[in-house]
Image (spheres, rainbow, N blue to C red):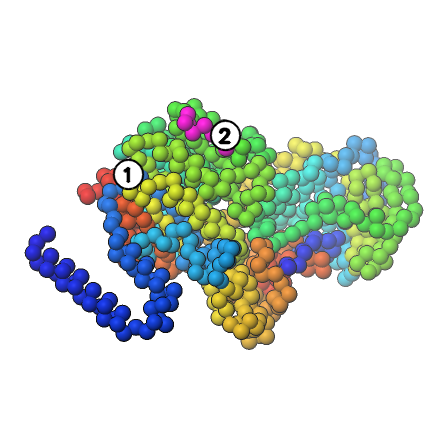
């Protein structure tokens, strides 16, 4: 450090001290004795002490599909209002909202102002933005055209981590072949090519393979250590009926669950909660879990599943037990996939319950790792048109009708009450006369929020989403960034060698 | 609390099918006499003529395969209820289908009365009506019932062995007349739903670039009137969608 810098730092510290002293002298006790004042002062003091290492042995990337900032706020309040002794719920934080580093993330695809998950996750896993609908293929290719994708395949974080000898894992509550998890391990010019039955003739003729096949039929050196989620039917032949009485979708006759066990060392395949709980971690180096023929259940409905499903938290915890066996480290990508679906259905309760479960999974990951060597990042792929509105009183149930500060039921211009949560568009839209919600239990998990513009499915939104980070390399998370910067943060923090850092 | 949405015996009242001109003359039980010895309640095909208060007529077909069943009201689409609690809507011309899993139905706050659909009318009706005449047709014993249903004097001729109505008159509002009933094999049932490109309803929101989905969304096929779900007032349930028919 040169003399100039030392002088500058000393001057800064000096000014800072003077400022604190001067302000303390003029602030009234009613201000400085306030718990708000004390807590926030402590918060800033703690931030001033944060030292961040540069290199991470392990990286965990959590992605809440469709987890807009309004989703975070509402989920935070929902969970807060479920805490004993809460002060209204607004004061609560989701587990990752107190991470020391945060950035805003621009999500657009190269061809869409409001993006889809394929393009956004490709940005995160490859460092390159692409078109909507394409999985780790650059945007010089055409969607749905295999030939044009040749030579445009992108190397992903999983590829790089495997090449470095790290263990890798992908977890989701959606289908493992769905766009977001798929972008971690597959390359496909169309997100819909989830099984061979979805491949058009052109794709077959030009040598493209389906996404499920790409998950399983990998070079063992580039295999995933852990893959947990839904989508079982995409891995089974159509002639096979699974344990939940659903036929497979594959036309090529391949049972990829068997191929997983056959092709990989110390490999196990589980499909229900009982099998999941019985996994012998010490003797399992490759774990495939497919817990539903399609997407796993919403967290709110999980207990109703026929065969039983693990929660996202349980999947993350088990995965970390396996991944941590590698002394070189690991890369784990965890998606909460059904927040997005809850929003599409205009059903805030299910979307928020899944967001809260994501928070629980992050908490489990924090507890199971060390912030000295593990970078944990939590983000979303895109937003939704989900709003928190009106002027509800502090502590008003977040899923409830708006009550004013005086406790009275707030009424709109049509003389009817309204909920705090709503959507700009979607299936809950009102055409004609708006329903009177006075006697409706809007906190029921099946309640569909009202919306403005009628659409069969509520849509994604185009505003920025957030990125929260803690651990080595988290100092790189700051400002407003393009989504593809996330790849470079991980690449640099974990020294994956993807560029010349 | 959200209203409980039930599919009732009025369901076909607002079927999108165009009224048929053909008069109903056949007595199903007798007409199906040659085959009735082989008819099992769990594997059959039953065709009904439905007539509403305005005189509009249309046909409805019920296919049973164990606990699974299909209902077809027109040539453009048919609906399946699986033993897993899923609702699948098929579009034969396009060879596409949309599956509503239980979680999707809950998220959309769509509830249906599976028993009523399986039996065309609620199987609880006989218990709430007074017995009348017992008729013995060549194939079936038919027990008559009479009484008020939804406040209307109604008559039901119930085929106990297959748990279906041979005739049901809901006042002057609606009537079901069984036209034919015949055995229907598991294999035939399975063939009906094969080779469809299926999509989960949960994926519709991410599939706007799919021309079929885009068309269906624009036409409102997926959730609107022809969804197969109807309220206790006989109105189409639009998945809490627009048109003022929220079911919150």
Q: Is residue B131 left or right of residue B174?
A: right
Q: From this viewpoint, which residue is outermost toward the left? A: A3
Q: Residues within 10 Å of mark 2 (few under 14, many from 20)?
A: few
Range covered by the magenta-colored residues: A277-284
Q: Is residue A323 left or right of residue B66?
A: left
Residue B179 against residue A326 in the figure, above or below: below
Q: Give the chain letter at badge 1.
A: A
Q: Which residue is mark 1?
A: A57
Percent across and percent down for residue A403 are: 54, 69
| Residue placed most toward the observer, A345 or A167 | A167
Q: Is residue A114 left or right of residue B147?
A: left
- Res A216 seen here: yes
Earlier along the polypeptide chain: callout 1 or callout 2? Answer: 1
Please tell me in which quadrant of the rendered image residue B19 appears: bottom right
Q: Give the chain letter at badge 2.
A: A
**Which mark identifies residue A296?**
none
Please tell me which residue is depicted at 41% across the width and 46% down the height of the picture: A363
Please tell me which residue is depicted at 62% across the width and 63% down the height of the picture: A440
Percent across and percent down for residue A429 are: 54, 63
Percent across and percent down for residue A353 are: 50, 51
Q: Is there one chain holding both mark 1 and mark 2? A: yes
Residue A89 among magenta residues: no
| Residue placed most toward the observer, A123 or B210 | A123
Please tell me in which quadrant of the rendered image residue A411 appears: bottom right
Please tell me which residue is depicted at 77% across the width and 58% down the height of the picture: B52
Residue A280 among magenta residues: yes
Please tell me in which quadrant of the rendered image residue B148 appears: bottom right
**Which mark identifies residue A278?**
2
Q: Where, quadrant-wise, is the C terminus of chain A in this rendering?
A: top left
Q: Residues within 10 Å of mark 1 (few under 14, many from 20)?
A: some
Residue at mark 1 to residue at mark 2: CA–CA distance: 29 Å
């Amino acid at each position: 450090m040169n003399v100039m810098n030392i002088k500058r730092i000393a001057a800064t510290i000096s000014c800072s001290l003077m400022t604190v002293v001067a302000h303390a002298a003029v602030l009234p006790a009613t201000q400085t004795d306030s718990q708000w004042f004390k807590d926030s002062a402590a918060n800033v003091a703690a931030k001033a002490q944060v030292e961040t290492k540069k290199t991470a042995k392990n990286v965990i990337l959590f992605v809440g599909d469709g987890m807009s900032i309004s989703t975070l706020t509402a989920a935070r309040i929902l969970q807060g209002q479920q805490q004993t002794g809460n002060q209204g719920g607004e004061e609560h934080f989701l587990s990752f909202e107190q991470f020391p580093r945060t950035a805003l993330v621009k999500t657009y695809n190269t061809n869409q102002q409001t993006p889809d998950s394929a393009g956004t996750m490709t940005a995160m896993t490859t460092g390159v933005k692409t078109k909507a609908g394409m999985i780790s293929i650059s945007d010089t290719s055409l969607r749905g055209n295999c030939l044009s994708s040749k030579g445009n395949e992108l190397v992903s974080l999983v590829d790089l981590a495997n090449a470095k000898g790290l263990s890798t894992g992908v977890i989701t509550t959606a289908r493992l072949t769905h766009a977001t998890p798929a972008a971690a391990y597959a390359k496909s010019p169309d997100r819909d090519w989830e099984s061979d039955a979805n491949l058009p003739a052109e794709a077959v003729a030009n040598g493209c393979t389906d996404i499920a096949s790409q998950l399983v039929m990998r070079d063992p050196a580039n295999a995933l250590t852990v893959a947990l989620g839904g989508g079982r039917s995409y891995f089974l032949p159509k002639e096979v009926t699974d344990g939940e009485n659903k036929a497979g979708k594959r036309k090529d006759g391949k049972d990829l669950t068997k191929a997983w066990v056959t092709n990989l060392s110390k490999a196990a395949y589980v499909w229900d909660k009982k099998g999941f709980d019985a996994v012998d971690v010490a003797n399992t180096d490759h774990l495939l879990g497919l817990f539903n023929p399609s997407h796993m259940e919403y967290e709110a409905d999980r207990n109703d599943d026929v065969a039983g499903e693990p929660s996202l938290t349980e999947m993350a915890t088990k995965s970390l037990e396996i991944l941590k066996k590698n002394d070189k480290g690991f890369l784990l990508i965890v998606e909460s996939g059904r927040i997005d679906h809850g929003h599409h259905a205009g059903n805030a309760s299910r979307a928020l319950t899944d967001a809260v479960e994501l928070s629980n999974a992050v908490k489990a990951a924090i507890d199971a790792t060390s912030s000295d060597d593990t970078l944990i990042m939590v983000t979303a792929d895109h937003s939704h048109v989900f709003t928190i509105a009106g002027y509800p009183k502090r502590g008003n149930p977040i899923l409830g009708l708006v009550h004013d500060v005086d406790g009275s039921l707030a009424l709109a211009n049509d003389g009817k009450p309204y909920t705090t949560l709503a959507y700009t568009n979607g299936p809950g839209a009102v055409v004609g006369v708006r329903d009177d919600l006075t006697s409706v239990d809007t906190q029921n998990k099946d309640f569909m929020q009202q919306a403005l513009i009628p659409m069969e499915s509520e849509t994604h939104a185009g505003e920025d989403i957030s990125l929260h980070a803690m651990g080595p390399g988290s100092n790189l998370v700051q400002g407003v960034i393009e989504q593809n910067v996330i790849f470079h943060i991980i690449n640099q923090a974990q020294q994956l060698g993807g560029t010349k850092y | 609390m959200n209203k409980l949405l039930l599919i009732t015996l009025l369901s076909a009242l607002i079927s999108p099918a165009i009224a048929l001109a053909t008069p109903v003359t056949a007595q199903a039980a007798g007409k199906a006499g040659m085959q009735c010895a082989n008819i099992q309640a769990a594997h059959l095909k039953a065709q009904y003529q439905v007539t509403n208060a305005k005189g509009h007529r249309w046909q409805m077909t019920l296919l049973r395969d164990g606990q699974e069943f299909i209902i077809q009201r027109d040539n453009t689409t048919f609906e399946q209820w699986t033993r897993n609690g899923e609702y699948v809507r098929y579009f034969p011309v396009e060879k596409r289908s949309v599956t509503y899993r239980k979680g999707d139905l809950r998220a959309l706050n769509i509830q249906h009365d599976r028993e009523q659909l399986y039996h065309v009318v609620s199987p609880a009706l006989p218990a709430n009506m007074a017995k009348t005449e017992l008729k013995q047709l060549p194939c079936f014993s038919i027990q008559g019932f009479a009484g008020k249903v939804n406040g209307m004097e109604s008559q039901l001729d119930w085929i106990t062995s297959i748990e279906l109505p041979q005739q049901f008159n809901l006042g002057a509002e609606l009537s079901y007349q069984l036209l034919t009933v015949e055995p229907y094999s598991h294999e035939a049932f399975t063939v009906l739903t094969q080779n469809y490109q299926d999509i989960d309803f949960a994926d519709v929101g991410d599939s706007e670039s799919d021309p079929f989905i885009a068309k269906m969304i624009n036409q409102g096929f997926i959730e609107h009137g022809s969804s197969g779900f109807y309220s206790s007032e006989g109105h189409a349930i639009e998945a809490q969608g627009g048109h003022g028919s929220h079911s919150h």
